[in-house]
Structure formats: structure tokens, C-alpha cells
Image (cartoon, coloured by chain):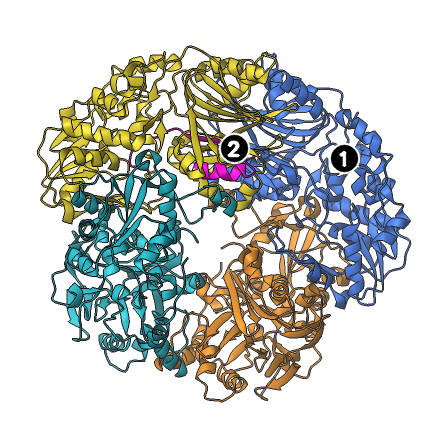
Chain colours: A yellow, B cyan, C orange, D blue
Amino acid sequence: MTYEVKSLNEECGLFGIWGHPQAAQVTYFGLHSLQHRGQEGAGILSNDQGKLLRHRDTGLVSEVFKNPANLEKLTGQAAIGHVRYATAGEASIDNIQPFHFKFYDMEFGLAHNGNLTNTQTLKKELEHSGAIFSSSSDTEILAHLIRRSHNPSFIGKVKEALNTVKGGFAYLVMLEDKLIAALDPNGFRPLSIGKMANGAIVVSSETCAFEVVGAKWIRDVKPGELVVIDKEGIHYDRYTDETQLAICSMEYIYFSRPDSVIHGVNVHTARKNTGRRLAQEFKHKADIVVGVPNSSLSAASGFSEESGLPNEMGLIKNQYTQRTFIQPTRELREQGVRMKLSAVSSIVKGKRVVMVDDSIVRGTTSRRIVQLLREAGAAEVHVAIASPPLAYPCFYGIDIQTRKELIAANHTVEETCEIIGADSLTYLSLDGLIASIGLETDAPNGGLCVAYFDGKYPTPLYDYEEDYRKSLEEKTSFY
Amino acid sequence: MTYEVKSLNEECGLFGIWGHPQAAQVTYFGLHSLQHRGQEGAGILSNDQGKLLRHRDTGLVSEVFKNPANLEKLTGQAAIGHVRYATAGEASIDNIQPFHFKFYDMEFGLAHNGNLTNTQTLKKELEHSGAIFSSSSDTEILAHLIRRSHNPSFIGKVKEALNTVKGGFAYLVMLEDKLIAALDPNGFRPLSIGKMANGAIVVSSETCAFEVVGAKWIRDVKPGELVVIDKEGIHYDRYTDETQLAICSMEYIYFSRPDSVIHGVNVHTARKNTGRRLAQEFKHKADIVVGVPNSSLSAASGFSEESGLPNEMGLIKNQYTQRTFIQPTRELREQGVRMKLSAVSSIVKGKRVVMVDDSIVRGTTSRRIVQLLREAGAAEVHVAIASPPLAYPCFYGIDIQTRKELIAANHTVEETCEIIGADSLTYLSLDGLIASIGLETDAPNGGLCVAYFDGKYPTPLYDYEEDYRKSLEEKTSFY
Amino acid sequence: MTYEVKSLNEECGLFGIWGHPQAAQVTYFGLHSLQHRGQEGAGILSNDQGKLLRHRDTGLVSEVFKNPANLEKLTGQAAIGHVRYATAGEASIDNIQPFHFKFYDMEFGLAHNGNLTNTQTLKKELEHSGAIFSSSSDTEILAHLIRRSHNPSFIGKVKEALNTVKGGFAYLVMLEDKLIAALDPNGFRPLSIGKMANGAIVVSSETCAFEVVGAKWIRDVKPGELVVIDKEGIHYDRYTDETQLAICSMEYIYFSRPDSVIHGVNVHTARKNTGRRLAQEFKHKADIVVGVPNSSLSAASGFSEESGLPNEMGLIKNQYTQRTFIQPTRELREQGVRMKLSAVSSIVKGKRVVMVDDSIVRGTTSRRIVQLLREAGAAEVHVAIASPPLAYPCFYGIDIQTRKELIAANHTVEETCEIIGADSLTYLSLDGLIASIGLETDAPNGGLCVAYFDGKYPTPLYDYEEDYRKSLEEKTSFY
Amino acid sequence: MTYEVKSLNEECGLFGIWGHPQAAQVTYFGLHSLQHRGQEGAGILSNDQGKLLRHRDTGLVSEVFKNPANLEKLTGQAAIGHVRYATAGEASIDNIQPFHFKFYDMEFGLAHNGNLTNTQTLKKELEHSGAIFSSSSDTEILAHLIRRSHNPSFIGKVKEALNTVKGGFAYLVMLEDKLIAALDPNGFRPLSIGKMANGAIVVSSETCAFEVVGAKWIRDVKPGELVVIDKEGIHYDRYTDETQLAICSMEYIYFSRPDSVIHGVNVHTARKNTGRRLAQEFKHKADIVVGVPNSSLSAASGFSEESGLPNEMGLIKNQYTQRTFIQPTRELREQGVRMKLSAVSSIVKGKRVVMVDDSIVRGTTSRRIVQLLREAGAAEVHVAIASPPLAYPCFYGIDIQTRKELIAANHTVEETCEIIGADSLTYLSLDGLIASIGLETDAPNGGLCVAYFDGKYPTPLYDYEEDYRKSLEEKTSFY
């Protein structure tokens, strides 16, 4: 699939609601605003007086609910929803969430954003004692742990299960009479709570959903918290006290929508700050700033304001690009046929361009854009990246699994500059990144997880430990 | 249909190619870059050694050719393609172009962008003498005129027909051994010629398609011209000498893609200039500039640079909004559920905002956005429009048919400001518009058609004359 | 397409109704009962107080109207409908009927069953004088002739047009205030009139539709007749007096549904009679009779009753076979994988089987079935065909265009028997056929067209004359 | 859904193959021939060198595999397939088989035909000890029992599980290196083994699939057997010796295809025999025999031969009736609009008709057909049913769950005759049925399960026991 030029993907978005007569519809609009967090599948599970109803399918939210009947049948005053990102091999409908577990004596729904690090160990143990998994998703593990717990209360079972799984996770659990939200001990993934005018409580991976559904932000879920929402209201509880904030810095750099606010910091503002700081660290002469649409427009605007260079629309992204699109043949591609981005000759011709982008993964996209700008007549192309070199994998919920795919794990900045064909290449410093985001916290790295940049993971890696060690010794050439 | 918040629509886009082994595929990518000119239907007609082949359907280009077989069957070295905008009642597949006319002795294909002003008269005359129309499109008229001409040569027949139809038109005609492009005597609609590296000649409504297919611009088709492309190359001919350039100013203001160049002027640059000029004409105090995405971002950037006010991302457009989207119920809408645009509280809160937009049609969208900004905490909202008040209909190819739908045709600027709920409302002056676009020409109005602003039409209105006269006397209240 | 094992296809079915509040719905059910006359496309055109509305598409009636909205929008008290058979190259939606012709001063709908013999000549003449055809169907010719007629009344124009076209035709024409039905001077195609309990008048290619919609048969349309149905009732008129009944004998043999009655003779009864007569003409010893499902079951039953041999279910047809079915690969086919028909070993094993079929076209199907029966253990397979050898093409509406495809045009009965691998091959005699059908008429051949059997056509062949002459001299080997 | 006029449905069909390079394709054709056993869903699971691959969906086999890619991806030399009948509420894709169970150490596929009688008890026990079910199908129980068994070998685990489940079942289990087929201790459901010319072994619910895929029957699976097929060949094993043949008599009467052979008796022949016997037991005067198409044509033919009355095609079934069909409104239905069956006036008019049908469930269909025949002019309608009165539910795999739906459980034969509006009503005697089928066995009831007729179930009813007791005391009126 060539829809995403950038091979950097979030793994999912969550939305939940309690106390609204049209809970599923609100969830639909909430999920729509989280669509950028996962385009491969979506689902909603509603709660109609204790009875759980569900619809899920592959595709965008608008495709999954193309037939209005599929949304209308999800009656009830509470709901949870999920948008899913999936790697190619796992596109089966079985893996699309929310999951719905039914028993002779009760039922519950479950949705998950993140990645567990002790999946393999737990799955083996569970299957060894008779468990059957119906999906290849690590989310299902929590359900088995809950069901097998001997704790007498359901909340007690959930706490026990949350203390067993490791890694990055935000969970929503829908029960007959309550909605539960829980976050991992490091708060790797964002999760916020809001309130609608009619009193309904909403939970979302990003606050942008609150603007869309007309809700006001109340507060973010904290690391190690278990939030229970029922007809009495919101109850804040904890399943562990061993917590340390390490929110994923890529949420600010690339994933989240610019209008979202995470731990008090607006994403657009954070990006604009990275652009400003990058302009300070940038050492070359140039005529204009061109941001790579759409994710780098905020950083480009900050860079422009700080540097005084005009911010121009030198690259245009086709708004109609879709996954179903027929791709140019290799032959046509070589003849210059492109579908997604085009460079504007009349703007870049003869200019020394600062091309601002948020990050470089494999470098292929950067190389292609540099080439586009040169073909359109740019005199020089200086690439400025609003984050440090991405050199280490993520195990908490972003799809960067190996160092082999990361150009910065295998090449110096000079080599990378040569490979992408730029006149210069400037990365934002790690200190610059942390200062630009500027969370109010005493936690290390300003409360951010920056392991992709420095390789220092805030937790043990469990099942991934050995593979990771080995990977540090391997090198691949991107020339 | 709520896909387009703005009820201002272009009527179609054209792309043609001669001399490329994968002509239909290149046309597909060309049409994709013209998708903003029409989303209701698309089609391609190819020429395989004199045999014409066609596929057309309702929907986006990517939907019409979702099944790759439909594109692959369009073999041959030449093709013409069309993207169509349609008013609700005419969504039938019969009206989707290119048309394909087959006779016992020959066949030809035809695609059209624009609107004829003597349709009714001509259709009546033709039907009176036995003609049967297979569509409700005015495009078919040209085919009947060509077929009934007694001129011995096909080119002669086409010239005769072009001198009979009146209004705004760009035509592409595909024959067994040539491709013909023709433009109306005022050049209302844009049409450019380019060349690919392998020598193939391309024709497109906008030059953005040239960047996408890797072609170089050669020159624009001039008013009254008939361009014939065949294996010998390009032949520039004329069917009339009574010409006067009056290119539609809305192409610069709203329709065309920012990376297109029309008659030597880049659209983004023209828009940025309108923003600069608007900043000069603007008389209020403000803190930040916020462009309405996506069409007003260029103007907002010009406004920001000229005024020195920071250009902020205070409005976010959901990239995944699609026509198939389920709409919020009235109840949910009242509770604040929105799908397409959201305002960013953390940016606009407490700020005096200049909201830059390209134009106002009915005012409903403007009112909604002003309200969004206020709800997000904006202290003041000053609306600045990068074009003059839109007060008169267009008869040459834009879907503004009556004065009833135009707020500026029925209310003063002060009234409009009150209706949309803004603190102030500033329109760009007509002189400012003409100067900002700045075509190099001696033609009246700087070579632009600005009739929607001043009611002075560059041609007689023929069949529309009487209705138009009457409409000048009617008023509607938008309160 | 492998849906029809037999390459013998009817060209279309007609249904019309006047005076029913749910005219389109009744037409839908009527067309459904005529589905066997054409499976490639269907359409309905309704008349709502003079305004004509239409929906048509490729596929079965149930597929074309899968979305109930497409049927519901066809409001009004009158309608005409069409089911279409099409040769591969003409599957375009443009050719699907009813056609809908719109003019500035009136509109009409048109549907046609049959084939014209002077199409080429008329099309050439019409196009020469400026006509543009929007389809490759010969049906459109009538519309051009009507529109160009100088006769002052519409009925007069239609009569003039009907006297200009030649060949086999049944037409339905829907006007603002009337429904017209017309039949060719030989009555090649069947067309009957009925009445519903609520007084609505219905017209149908076959009377089976009357049973389905609860109508009573009134009378058949006669050769050369023009029937006008309006709010006053039914008016029987004629456009010519030079008529001679020659109803297509294949309607009785193969095409029509067994429950239809044509010119007073029930189709099942006619087929049973052919089976009885065939049994009399059959000269071999056998144990059981097996009809090829479904078209030959009536003949098999007659054969069994006359011969005293038991009628057994030795061949089973899969009821779920559909056009969308994936076909076995050649390899699987050779291994014996079959989809449509299977022979029942426990019935045919060791038996001398009379395999009764209605006709042989190319012989490939017969050969395959004979082989099936042998593989299932039949001791002998005697093929008995309930019609004479099919040796000449049809030009009046059946898709047998050339002698090359007809085994009986190229081989003797003995050779054919050898090619299909049977122990014996018996055809019904032409006299036997005529006697079995037994119409009450003085017309030649008992009022039947039997030209496919004896090459004596009841009319001149016009545009087909020359090709036909040549074809008589060519031979092809089917070994 | 109105597709099935008769509310009597089989629950599923199975097909398996081992040792064929195109195993999934052969399974596709096999399932196609079993389509009458279930139309709601279908799936195939293939085995490519130990790796299991699957595709399943709702709809007919041809719909599920409409996209050939879904079949082509099922590579490998072995496969199992399933067609599914489902009650309305369970149409979810989660319930469509084959199931595919994956574990860290192995995987297996599972398909099931039949119904367990101790489902509730087993599910409760399993869930109590931590099991999570991913479907509402009773099939999944076997997988949990297998996985939790402590028996060291997989075959041992399967045997243990088979001894735990009760009721009617035929299972196919696909393992990495073998295919297992198993039948319940009473052999309620049919299951046969065959061999293709290339040596591939096939297993099928009905032998009709063998004719279709070109296989030869080897032998039927016996009650209590476990058949293991691997590269060494076929191994016949048993999991219990407490067996007693009681094959479902409805397989002969209604469900199976006429060309299938079950336990040595051809279904068409059995039905013809029931017709013969019914003619002997029939006491009324009549002129013609008319079978209700398609299931009663064999019985009608036997009745005709025995009675000497002609067998006529007095009822015609539309071959194109599909599930997607739009239904007549109540108003149209009252006006006589019908879609599926029509009576042939020219055949039945004035005749005393014996209407032969296989069974009566609720009586609504019979009443409708009797009325059709009377409206078409039948002088008398004598209904003759080729099986005894259906008065008791089935718990082994047929969808007759309650006595409330059975007219014969609530009314005498005389009352039923009155309700359906017939002149007389004759049921075949139970002895007549058993004699007509005539299995070679010493088992009670000639080896048949006839509990639906006499209420004597060959096994305990387990979880159904109590409900059944209660139902015996309830009565419903069908007047």
C-alpha cells in the first residue's frame, strides 16, 4: 500500500462515552476526528441497558458505517470506539476492535491503544493452560487475564490484569454498568477525559475529539490510573503507584492532530516551537521556507517567523489521494508521473529552499521531495528536520520495529544528507526538542519518552530484550 | 450533500494527451490532479489506432477506475478525460463526459468545460429539425452542429459549430487521427498545452496536471483558438478573430489549485497578493491571522506577512471528510457536534482574530466559522475576504445561477457583517483584486472577467437575458 | 460467460401496464417472470402524470433494482419494462432499454423485442442527414423515424415509422397520455394483452407474466396491429394489411416458459406433444427416459408417456449456478470437475438411456452430457431431439447469426451422432413439429416460422441477403 | 427473508479433501454442490504444508468467493469447507465456519454439521474455568475440549472430546499433517468418503459432491467412527462402540439432493418409492398429478407411475428468484402478484389435481399453493404428502425447534385439510416411509431417525429435556 508515503504509524485511537442518548453517534464523530491514528479498521460497541452491541469492519470510519443502519442499531447511552492501524499481514476483521467478550454470566467490551512488551510470554502461559485466542492482537490477553483472575470483584480482576501486562497501553473496558479507562504506568499514550453540555462523560486518545463533539476537557488520565465512569459520575482510582511520566514525544512531533492538547501543551504550538528552535540551530543561507504538507506546516511557520524567511507553498498535496488509488507503473513513475505531492515551479525556481519536515524514517520520501524541488528549479535544497535523528525502535505503540528501517541508525548525518541528495541536513537537537515541547514536570527528559532518539528506554523490554540487543550490532546500507 | 461547505462550484476539468503509449493512464493521473474541479463524475476516452474506447461513471476518479480493468482496457496512444461537477438533478451517467459519438462512417469523442448561453435556442432549432439528444448536457449541441454542417472538412465543420455556440467553453475533440482543443472568444476558462519528456503533447484545464505527469508547459490556448494535435505536431489555428481576453477571476480566487499558473500568473502568488492588499485595506486592530483551510491559506499568509501579525493554525480541517459521511442529527449539531472544521481553543483563546477567507456566497459558512472561533474563546473575530462582494450570477461555467443565493446581492456590507456575527467585515476592493492578480495585458479589467462583482458581462447573455433582467429587481432577506 | 451452456438466446422480453397506482412495481414482477428472455440488463420507465421516469442497468431484474429506492422513485400509473439479452461486445448500459427520448416539446419511452433486417440501410440514411445515435441498438432507429416524420399526429408518425422498418419486432411506446403496442406484419415475436382485477391493462411478451401479476388474458396482439391504451381503454388499430402469421417456432421449442400460452397453445403442452411424436418417430430400444433439465422436461414427460418407458431424474442441474461463478480450470475440468449438470449413477447405471433434449446448436453441450451419462455407467445413450435439425440462421430476433455455429448446417445426422458420441440420434420431423404445436390457422407451416429448419424465410432478408447467400456455400468441420 | 417458502432448514454441509494440488478449488466446487444445505455463509480453510489459510463470509459460495483472489490465496494440498444455514439473529461472520484455532505451538481447523444437545452445560463448565468463546456456535466447544484434554496425543484429545459432546454431529478437523472426519454414535448426519482419479481423498456430507468433482464413492463414515486421512492413506478408527444407526429420515424426504446416495440408497429413488407407496395409500379420484417444484418432483413421478395418472407441469417455479428480491407489497399480494410459484391454467383448468408435496410444516405454503391451483381453475385439489405428519421437533441438526410451528402437532389431519383448503389430505404412513426408503440394516425403524413423526428420540435430550416435556402440553391454533 502506498497511501502513506511515510512509514511511521500510530497504533490506534480510542473514544468512549457514558450518559448520552446517542452514544454511538457521538462516538462515530469522535472516532472520525481520530481517524489519523488508524485507517485500517474501526468499530463501535454500545451499551443498551446492559446489553452490548457492536459493529466493526476494515476501512475508514466513514466506510465501516457507510450503511447508516450499522450505526443506528448501536443503541444505548454508552459506547466505546476504536480506529485501528494494522501491519499488512494482520488486516483480518478478527483483529478489529472493540473486542466483545460474551459469557453465560456476563459480557464486556475492550479497546486498546499501545503495545505490550510481554505478549509472547503471557500468551504462551495462557495457551498452555487451555486458553484459545480468537485474534492475533495482544489486546485479547487482558481479557483472558481478567477472566482467569480469582479476585472476587471485576475491578479487582482488572487491576490484577493491568499489573500483569507490561509496555504501553491505554484501555477502555465497557461493562454492563460502567465504563473503565486505564493507562500504563509511564503514560506512553495520551488519554483525556471531557464532559459534554448534557453531562455525558467522554474519554479520548486526543482532545481534538472534544472540540468535534462539543465537550470540555476535564483532565488527562495519569500514569497508573484506573478511571471508573458510571451513573454516579467519575471515580479516579490507581492500580499501581510505581509510575513515571514518559509520554511519547512522537505524539507532539508527528502523530497527534495540531489542535490536540496533551498534558497541557497544544500540539501546533509545540511544533511551531520546534520550528523556531530549529531555525536557531540552522546554519545555512536560504531564501524561502517550504513545509512538507500537512504534518510539517506548523514547524515551517515557526521556522519562518524565527528566521524571517518567507513561508511559501512550494509543495502541494493532492487532497483526493485515497487508498484505492491506482498507482503509476514503474515506467510512468520514471517519466515523472506523481500522485500525492507536487512542487510549484513558479515559487521555488531559482530559490534556496529550506525544506522543513518533522522526521526522517528511511529517507526515501525525503530523497523524493528533494528531487521534486530540484526538478521544479530550486537552486539549493536545505533539509531541516524538526526532531532529532530517529535511530532506535519503539516498543510502546509506534510501528518502528527494527533499526534496519531507520536511516539514522545506519548512517551519519553527513551520509544521510548525501543519500537524500540535499545541500545540507539539519536535525533539531534532543535538548531543543525537550525545551520546545516544554511540559511542566520534574520527570526525566521533561516527561517525554525520547528512546527513539537516544536508545534509553524507560522500562525493561521483556520479550523484546534479546532481539533488541542483537539489532544494535547490525548495520544496513541505504545508499 | 454536505461535502462542500461552500456552495461555489467549478463546472469541470479537462485533460488530453497525444502520442504516449500509456495515454489513458497518464490521463488518469492528470484528471486526479484536476479532481477539485469536479467530484461528481469522471471519464476517459482513448484512441487505439483510430478506434475510440471509453469508460465513465459517477464518483471520484479513483472510484470510477477502482477496478483497474476499466483503465487497462483503454488502450491506445491518445486520450481525453473529464471530471464533472453536476447539480443534483443531473447526476445521471448519461451526462458524464467525454461523450462518444459513433456513425457508420466515423466516430469522435468530445469533452467540455464551461457553459453555453444560447443552449435553449440551439436545442430547440435542432430538435425541430429531427435531432435527438441523449443527455441533458449542453455539450451535445456541438456534436449536432458539427454533424449537420455542410462544410466538407471536419475541421471546417468544427469551426462552423464553434462560431454558432456562445458563452464560456473549452472543448477537447478526439478524432481518429487528431486531437482538437478549442477555447471560447473570451478565454473564460483556462486551457494550457504542455509536452512530456517522451514528446507526448498534453492539454489541461490547469497546469498543475503538468507537474503531476512530468510535462513542461508550452503555452496557454488563446481566446478564439483551435489547436490541432496530430502525428505531425501542434498546429495553432483560429475560428474567429473577434476575441477579447476575460479569464474568470474566480479561477485565481478560489477554483484553481495554488500550484497552477494561468496566463503567466501563479495562483498561490496571486492569492498571497490579494492577502497582502487586503491587509493594506484592512482597518482594524488584531492579534493573529487565521486562514480558513484549505483555500484561504495563501491569502492568510500574504495578509500575515504584510500586517506583521502572526499566521496561526486556529482552524483545523479534518482530512478524512468524505461524501459518504453520516451527518450529525440536528440534536447533535446543536450540542456542538461538528465534522469538518474545528477551532483550536489554545490558539484563539482571548485573541482578536482576523479570519481570512476567499469569498462569501450565502454567508452560512462564514457565520458558522465565526461562531466556532467565538466558542473557542476568540475575543474578537474580524472577517477579511480576499475578493469583492459576490453580487451577480455567472453564465460562463460557475454554478452561481441566481442572485437569490448571494448574500451580497441582497444586503449591504454592514448587514452582512451583522448576519455572520463578526466584529467587522472587510472585502478586498475590485481594483485591489485586479492589481493583485496583475496579468500582463491591455484588456479591460486586466484581462479578467469580474462580472460577479460588478454585473458588467463581457458578452450578450442570449437565452439568460430576460431572467437576468428580472432577477435584478428581486430581493431576499438572509436574516 | 458460461452461464448458458446452450448458445441459443432470445433477444429480450417486454412488459407494459396502464392504469395501476403501483405501475412500476407490477412491471418489476412482470419482468421477473420474463427473466428467462434476457439476463444481461433490465429497465423500467414509468409515467407519472405525463412525466417519464426511468431506471436501467446491467444484470438481472433483482440486481438492477437491488436498491428499493430505484424502484420507488418510478412513480406513476403506467410503465413499460424490458429485459435484455446482449452479445458480449454490447454490454454497455447505453443499450439497455427502455430508451427515453426527451425533446423541448415532448418526451417518449421505447422498448423493443426482435431484430430489424434493414437496420444498416436506415442507419446510414439517417446519419447521412444529421442523426446521432446514442446506442448501437437497432431500437433507436424507430425513434429517429418517428421524430423525422412529417405526419401531423404522433400515431401517424408511428405508423409511418413502422412501415419503414423491416424484420421481427414487438414495440412498446410510452407517451404522456397513452401506451402503444405494435407487432411486425408476421407476428414473429409473441405479444399478449391482459387485464388486472382493478382494471389496469397489461401487455407482455408472454402470458406467464399474467399469472404472476394476477391478470387475465384478453387477446394476443395480431400481426400488423397497433394497439393504443389510454384512459378511454384499448383501441385496436392497424398500420398495414399485408400480414401473414409466422410466429417463431423456437418460442414453443425452447424460449418461452412452459406456463405461457401463445396463440392459444400452452407451451408445456406443445412440448409434451413434441415428446410424444418424437417417441413415435424413435426407432431404438431403451430402458429409461432422461430429460435434460430444465427446458426438456416437458418433452421427456411426453416421450415417456407415449413410449411407456419410465421418466427418470438421471441428470441434476445445480440450482445455485450463477453468472458470478468461478469456473474450473482446464486441469480440474479434465479431472471431471463440473458445476452445472451431474448424472446420477444409481439411476443410469447399466441402463439404455433415451436422453431427450429440445435442440442441438453446436453439439458441444450434447457431447458433454452424453459423456456424463456414459461415465455414470449408462449402457447406451440414445439422443432424441424434440425439434428438427437447426441448420439456418435467424434474422428476426434469435441470436443464431451464422451457419458456422450450427452443427446441422455442416454435418449429416449420422456425422452429428458420431461427433456427440451417442449410440443413436433422432430428430423430430418438421411435419411432426408443426403437427405437435397445432395452431388453429390456415397460414403456411401452421402459422409458424420454421426457417431455421428449412431455410425458407417468410420475408425478404434486406441487409442480410448477401451475407446469407455466401454463407450457404461455406462448410465447417465440427469433428 | 422470503427466499425459502418452506421453513424447514438443514444445518450445514461439509466437504474436505486431502492430496490434491488445487485442494481449495475442488472444495469450492464441492461446496457449490452442497449449497442447498446452507445458504447463509460459506468458508474454506486450506493447508499449505502445515500452514492453515482461510476465507469465509456471509452469502452463497459464489458470493463469498466472488473475488477470485480469495480462492487463489488458499493454496495447499488439503482443505475443508463448510456451507452454513443460520437463524436470523446469528448471521454474524464470527459464526461462519470452518473455524481456525491458532496457538503458539500448533493450529487446527474445524467444521461441523449437526447440533449438540449438551451445549449449555458444557459451555457453562468451560467458561467457569476461564474459557472465552469467540462465537455463539456450539462448534467451538469441541475446540476447547480438545485443547484442555490432558491426553498426550492429539487423536487421543479428539476422542476424549467426542465422547464428551452429545447429539448429532459430523466433524472435519484439519491438522498440520492430517485430516480427521468423525460422526456421532447414531450417524444422524450423512458423511461419505470418496477418491479422485489422481488419488486425492474427499469427504462430503453428500455423495452428489463426488459426481461434481469427479470422485468415486468408497464408503460412508459409520456411527462412532473417527477417520484419519494423511499421506499414508485412510485409517478407520472408533472413539466409541456404543453406536446405533439412526440416520435422519428428512435427508431422504427433503434435504439431500436427488442424486445423492446415503447408506446405499439413492435419494431420488427413495422419493419415487414414497410417491409410489403414497399412491397406494391414496383413496381419492383424480385426473392429474402435479408435484410442487423442485423437491417433490421425484415423489410426483412415482405417484404418477403407480397410479397411472398423468404427471403434469401444473406449477412453475421461477428459476431466477433470489434472496435480494424486492417483495410485493401487501396490496399487490392481495391483487394476486406472486413471485416464486405460478399455476398453469391451461393444464389444471377443470381438472381434479393431486398436488404432491414432500412435507407440511406450518401449512401456510400448502394453503397458498392450493389457492393458486384453485384460482387457475382446478376442479378439486387433493393434497398428498410423501411423509407422515411432522409433529415433533428435531434436536440433532434440523431447524425445527418447537412444536408451536408444526401444524401437525396442533391439529388433526381433518383440521389441517380444512386449514389448507384442500379437498382431501393424505399423509404417507410411517411404515410406508420406512419401507420406501428400505435401508439394509437390522436397526430399529429401518436405521432411520423418525422422531419428528413419532416423538421417540433415539438418545436422551440432555439440556433440551425440560423444555421438550413442557412443549408437549401446549397447543396453538393455526386457523
Q: Are marks 2 and 1 on the same chain?
A: no
* Kind of residue indicated by mark 2: Ala
In the picture, the disc for residue C1 is none
Q: Which residue is mark 2?
A: A200
Relative to residue D305, is residue B303 drawn left or right?
Answer: left
Disc 1 crowd, CA 10 A, few/some/many (<14, 14-19, 20+): many
Write down the residue under mark 1.
D394
**Which residue range is magenta in the image?**
A4-31
Q: Is residue C326 visible?
A: no
x%, y% of residue A300? 21, 36
Measure the alpha-carbon separation of dots 2 and 1: 49 Å
Observer-nearest residue: D108 or B151?
B151
**Residue A386 drawn at (x, y percent):** 22, 29
Location of residue B119 by image quarter: bottom left
Nearest the viewer among D55 and C362 is: D55
Placement of A122 over or under C350, stated as above or below: above
In the image, is residue A468 part of the stretch drawn in magenta?
no
SS assignment at label 1: loop
